[in-house]
Every structure is written in C-alpha cells, then in structure tokens.
Image (cartoon, helix red, strand yellow):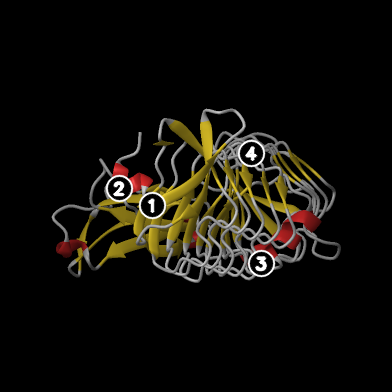
Amino acid sequence: MAPIAAKAQFTYTTNADGVSLTITKYTGPGGMVTIPTNIDGLTVTVIGTNAFTDNTNITGVTIPNTIGSIGSYAFFFCQGLPSVTIPDSVTNIGAYVFYNCIALRNVTIGSGVRSFAPFAFARDPITNLVMSANTTNIAVEAFYYCALSTATVPGHFGPSDFMGAFVDNIATNVIVADGTLSIQDELFEFEGLIANIVLPESLTSIGQEAFYYCQDLTNITIPAAVTNIGTEAFGESGLIHGGAFFSGNAPSVASTLFAPGFSNILTAYYLPGATGWSNALADLKAVLWNPAAQSGSFGVSNNQFGFNITGTPGIPVVVDACTNLSNPLWMPLQQLTVTNGLAYFSDPQWTNFPGRFYRIRSPH
C-alpha cells in the first residue's frame, strides 16, 4: 500500500472489478510526482480524465507499470513537465492528454500503446520522441505543432495517417523503430526536413515513393534484410548528392528508383562479398565500398597523428574517434573522399587525450 503521505495526494474511485482504482485528481504540492502502484490495497490501473489538468507545479512524473490507460486531458496544460515515459503496460492514451505542455521536450512511449487519440501531444515543444513498432494507429494531429528534432517512429502507417498525425512536422533525424518490417508507400514523401534516417535491421522492403522529394536526405544505409525497393522510392531526393549504402546483397528493385530523367544518377555503394550488383541494376550506379586503413602508414607528421585510407577511387568515408572502447562514444572527426584510391586522415587534437581509438564508416 502507498505511504500515508502519497495516499493523501490523490483522490480515486474504485473500478468495477473491486480490486483496482482510477485516480481522479492529484491534490499534492507538485514537484516530482510518483504515482503509486497501490492505494488502500487497490491496484492503481487508470489515470483518469483531467486528473492533473492545469497543474503547473509538476516538474516530473513517474508512471508505474500497473497503469493500463491514461484518460483524456489527464496532463493537459501541465506547463512545468519536461519529460514523460509511458510504460509498456499502457495500451490507451486519450485525447489532449499532454496538450500544450510547453516544457515537454522528451517523450518515450512504451510498446503496449497501439493507438493515439487526436491532439494527444499537440502543441508540445517535443524535441525527442521515441515510439515502438507496435503502434498501429495515430489519430489526426496527435503530434500537431511539435518541434521535433529526433523521432523514432514505426514504418507501417499509411502516408495520410502519418502526415496527418505530424502535420508536416516530422523531425530532422528519424529512426524507424526496431521490429518494423516495411516502409509503406509514400510514407515520408515530401518530408523535406528529414536529413538523417536510420532503418532497422528487421526491415525487408521499402515502398514506392517512400522517400520521394526528401531533399535534405543525402545519405541512407539500407539494411541487409531488404529484398525489395519500390518505384521511385528515392525520387527527387537529396541522395543524388550522396548515395545509398547497402549492407547486403542487391535487392529486387523497380525499373526506376530515382525518377524519370535521372537515370544512372543514384550511387549505390555495396560491400565486398555482396552479390547481384551491376551498373545495369535499375538506375543505380553500383560502386564497391571497401575502405581500409593502410598498414604501415600510422604515424605522426607535423605534430598530427594520421594514417592512409585506401579503397575504390571516389568513395566517401567518415573517420570517428572515441577514448573508451568499453563504453564507446564515437564522435565524427573528418569526412574524406578516397581520391585516386588514397586519402590521408590526420588528427590535430590527438595530444589532448591519453588514448584515442579510430574507426572508418560510411557517411550514414
């Protein structure tokens, strides 16, 4: 049972099952609020409609994994709430539940949530949103007028549902949620803000016009499990300025991946040992991506540590560095082009660290 002090902060009603309850009102002082799992021997399973509405004193809330439903307007206009984590136990989120929480920056939504009601997080300055692949329905304008920077989203929505939910306000950095099998037709079409996208290893197909006119998207990595890419999936996108990096064998592709009139302009970088690649594959220019640090080239020159990188002429590479391999935090240092089969990397900051480790990767 909850401590007496915690019990005094909530009013509630007993649910029909006689063993659980719904919180109807928070009456505490605010600050960091922890919703108890039990009150008076009853399990707390529902945060009721308007339970925290207009409470500007809340600076944080912990929602326990006994909660299955959060009612409409539950945290409406809670202007001091900076972040929220919805546990996996929650399956239903009501309308306007976090509407106009003007301090809300970080939102993590558990895997139990299957749908969102209208305006659930509308008019919140959310910069980081995490959703799971289990969400199957997003109501219109659920994330209307948010300020997203990074968003983890499912890939199986229809484009009208997706665009209606975010109202052309999708993030600069998009992560498609783990477990997503397909990117639906036209899903990210005309989402011009997207500059970086991460696709999950579970992905097997990319629909037609999925990234059409994503003009800020210059590089993308295609997971090895992808076996099919639809017509004009990358049509008129910024990939003409970078390329698509394929982790596996050549997928089955439509006759036109980019757009009519842009034949042979999209560069497809593939790895050594991958099969099925040819310059005649759709409208792709297939290029072997095989950079390697040159043995014997490591050393200090002009007080800068550096080394040579070899590989197919013209391929782009990025060199990252970290200081701890046990818990690596890789930071990009330099992007290079392997001109004429050779590029030289140097690190002018190497003396500022007791030890530094380097890796070579693709630009995305």
Say what secondary structure mark 2 lies in: helix
Task: State the residue at coordinates (72%, 36%).
Answer: 227
Estimate how packed mark 3 is, as few (under 14), some (14 to 19) or many (20 or more) residues with alpha carbons within 10 Å.
Answer: many
C-alpha separation, residue under disc 2 versus residue under disc 4: 37 Å
**Which numbered disc, 3 or 2, marks the residue closer to the eye?**
2
The mark nearer the N terminus, 3 or 1, is: 1
The amino acid sitting under disc 2 is Ala
The mark nearer the N terminus, 3 or 4, is: 4
The mark nearer the N terminus, 2 or 4, is: 2
C-alpha separation, residue under disc 3 versus residue under disc 2: 38 Å
Per the rendering, the mark at residue 9 is 1
> Which residue is more in the foreground, 185 or 138?
138
> Which residue is more in the foreground, 266 or 175?
175
Q: Is residue 319 left or right of residue 304?
A: right
The amino acid sitting under disc 1 is Gln
Task: State the residue at coordinates (50%, 54%).
Answer: 25
The amino acid sitting under disc 3 is Tyr
The mark nearer the N terminus, 3 or 2, is: 2
Residue 314 appearing in the image: no
Task: State the residue at coordinates (85%, 49%).
Answer: 255
Image quadrant where one finds the N terminus: top left
Tag 3–tag 2 contact (CB < 8 Å): no
Q: Is residue 334 left or right of residue 283?
A: left
Residue 319 appearing in the image: yes
What residue is pinned by disc 2?
A: 5
Tag 3–tag 4 contact (CB < 8 Å): no
Per the rendering, the mark at residue 144 is 3
Tag 1–tag 2 contact (CB < 8 Å): yes
**Which numbered disc, 3 or 4, marks the residue closer to the eye?**
3
What residue is pinned by disc 4?
A: 134
C-alpha separation, residue under disc 3 versus residue under disc 1: 32 Å
On screen, residue 24 above or below 172: above
